[in-house]
Amino acid sequence: MTDNTLEIPLLLTKLEANLRQQIKQRKLINPIMIGVHSGGAWVAEHLHQQLAIEEPLGLMDISFYRDDFSQCGMNPQVKPCQLPAHMEGRDIILIDDVFYTGRTVRAGLNEIFDYGRPNQVVLGVLIERDGRQVPLQPDCSGCSITLPPGQRIKLTGPAPLGIHIQSFPTESDD
Amino acid sequence: MSKIHISNGHIIDPANNIDKTGSVYLADGKIVAVHTSETNGFDFTADKTIDASSQFVSPGFIDLSVRLRDPGQSYKGTLLSETSAAAAAGVTSLCLPPDTRPVIDTQAVVELIHDKAEKAHYNNVFPIAALTQGLAGSELSSMYALKEAGCIAVSNADVPFSSLLVLRRAMEYACSHDLLVIYHPDIPSLSNNGCANEGAFATRYGLPSIPEASESIAVAQCLELAELTGCRLHFSQISSKRSAIKIQQAKKYGLKVSADVAIHQLHLTENDIEPFNSAYHVLPPFRTDKDKLQLRESLANGTINAICSDHQPHDLDAKLGAFPETEPGVSSLETLLPLMLKLVKDNAITLSQGVAALTYKPARILNIQSGSLSSGLPADLCIFDTEQHWEISQDNWKSAGRNTPYWGETMKGRVTKTIQAGKIIHSL
Amino acid sequence: MTNIQLNQNGKLKHFLSIDGLNEPILTEILNTAESFTSMSKQQVKKVPLLRGKTIVNLFFENSTRTRTTFELAATRLSADVLSLNIATSATSKGESLLDTIHNLEAMHVDMFVVRHAISGAGHFIAQNTAPHISVINAGDGQHAHPTQAMLDMFTIRQYKQDFKPLKVAIIGDILHSRVARSQIQALNVLGVKEIRVIAPKTLLPSHVESLGVVVYNNLEEGLAGVDVVIMLRLQKERMTAALLPSEREYFKCFGLTEARLKLAKPDAIVMHPGPINRGVEMESSIADGPQSVILQQVSNGIAVRMAIMSLTMQHNGVAQ
């Protein structure tokens, strides 16, 4: 996979289309969209507008739910959470920028469930890449790629949105 | 008894104004003669020759305050362990303050101490009698009997009197028996269980503090009483500028007053205290730079007559706790020489003055025939190497107490041999 | 001081005193606390950050208020909390401090929050406890109460944003106050313009200027133009005799009245670590008035303590 195929507008359009399908298929009623800081939030802002979601956009920082506190310590810049007060029984669309090991989504799900038992959660990501470490996967994505070992992909933003591929000597979590 | 010739050492005997290389001759436990290049040769067949080249030879040190913790507190130290430390420190005579357990206020205790000293093969443990019975500060002790039993002076250790009237009477009574009164100056209502000098350090760390005035007021009171009663007075372990100045004025005025200072007070101030490190918890507390400067000046100009170790060994538990809750005191015998030498290096005093403050001056205060290398005096000497570096660690430390702020540090200057009554009691 | 509170990487390991900590560390605490306040507005007031960790509140001095905020802070971080109230008396020694600590260590705890009547107790415990354990000082003797100082700084930042131009007045029993000492240190590190201490001479420690403050013995003069007014509790239980003639006289000279408060800036905030002695330190109307941020201090206390607990524990599992 080369960078040329990773064009943001294309990916956003594809993800939006897939999401519409999911909303129909899964019969989501008045869903709450939640974007995971920071990349997921930027993507969600765009999608929230395009899909004309009625419920205000929710934003979530999963820093306090990460599983690597003992290894990595605190995130120095935790962003404020904006989540609706009542999530019990609601349909949730969770949006993130990159799905990699799956740990971020696990943390996000833990945080959502701490707020109340949702009816269902649909996961949409802009880029799904190889390297899964827990048995989770997105319900829809903008594209699905594989990357050479030691490479990480990240969304930059908020304006303009861009894609950044970095090389890392060792494996990092996402 | 053997005849010993100590050769080639640099002899420092301030009492006799000797400060040059030469020989010292000992026989039958006494000093026979001291010969330097200025004097004629001497016919002497030694049984033993000690070569003291590159080293100094001085009278053995006389320490005005050494707590052996014996009798009564053997978990902190014993007569055996602490006299062994004394010997390693070059101390050939030491004064034992009366706050042993039981207190030195009966003949029996004095005899017990003498017995123990004999068993430890250390002569010259001079018990100081309590001024009041049980050191309770209210009733006079049997000072005459205690003097007869061998006490060299009377003191309140560091325990307060119930009133100035009792202090006055005690001083008068001591005077009538020509006993030196050794007084530790402190007003408990002012020092108020403090553990640090009242100043910037105590304020910063929220430590209960002791104002200088609690010492200087006690000094002033006692000086007045000394004039009133005519007794010979010695202040133990002065720590503050104001006290030193008052003593200086009193001496000028003509009072029979002397004073000593603990060796560590001449080096450490509140600025040196590692916060909450109980090794620095001492009473009187480490004060300020201006106090330290004054103490050094007063030592140099003779206001303060003598240096002592103020040796107070402690068990581990005594120093394990939040700073104010720990017991005060430093195990200081073995740092006596290197710290005195450091004063010389700092140009606060000359080597001669330092040795004097540890030898003939304390001897004069106590009125004993010692502290110099005059012919006929007991052969109490110490030989020391001013250049030797050594680390304060368990291999090099004889005292049972390891409570010193210098633990683990490298010191410069070490006693290599100590001779008491002609016998070698310490040798490296 | 720096050595013992920070680990090899210069990160907070113990929190014993503001003394020795620099501005970046204090700001990190404030920022972390910020993220916890927005969380505590949510319905679910828990995060799993310290799940599985055991925190022991060791209170040798009674304090319901501070102890409960520490308990709440620990619980909101999902930690297990153990609260021990150990009465100390000078006469009955009982178990030594060290033995108490070692016994608790044997139960595999991760943190001690200690309040003690003797200055230096926190340091002593930190120096003698197992290497993986963090110690937080909840007040030791007259030495320090750093978590209180941090929540006070947090409150000031909430209302004033920038520390640099502020004139802060601390009024009351500075001599016995560990809170005041910690506040003064924090204000200095954060670089406020001026710190004033206002008290009768008997309630000021010796050489107090060396802490970096300007001394006023007159309340009216001291209050002129200040941005923050911090009232200290008149600590009856720690006063020995002959420090003040009476509470009444104290209020006359140093009590914060409406009239006196007007001397400060019109937008000045009034703070108090609590509990308040109404009519002694300040008029009731001020305690309940618009300039008082006292209740805000209390609610900030939990977020700030959560921040301090998380920051000191964050390298708990890492081999140093």
Image (tube, grey):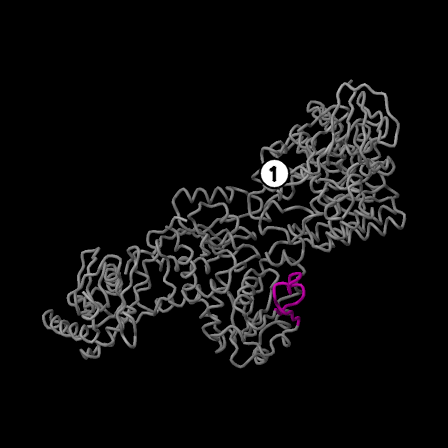
Residue at image location 40% in from the left, 61% down from the top? C306
Q: In x, y percent, where is residue C313?
A: 40, 54
Q: Quadrant of the rendered structure where residue A139 is?
A: bottom left
SS at badge 1 = strand
Q: In x, y percent, where is residue A171?
A: 28, 55
| B47 to the left or right of C177 | right
Q: Is residue C62 above or below residue B79?
A: below
| Quadrant position of the N terminus of chain C in the picture | bottom right
Q: Is residue B299 above or below residue C300?
A: above
Q: In x, y percent, where is residue C229?
A: 55, 73
Q: Of C192 and C297, which appears nearest the observer?
A: C192
Give yes or no for residue C192 being in the magenta stretch. no
Instruction: Find disc 1 in the rendering and name its residue.
Output: B391
Residue range corresponding to the magenta coloring: C197-217
Give yes or no for residue C215 being in the magenta stretch. yes
Task: Give the chain letter at badge 1.
Answer: B
List the single residue furthest toward the right.
B254
| Label 1 crowd bin: few (<14), some (14–19), many (20+), radius 10 Å | some
| C270 to the left or right of C132 | right
| A96 to the left or right of B196 | left
| B106 to the left or right of C303 | right
Q: In x, y percent, where is residue B51?
A: 74, 27
Q: Of B88 and B158, which appears nearest the observer?
A: B88
Residue A87 appears in the figure: yes
Q: Is residue A163 above or below residue B221?
A: below
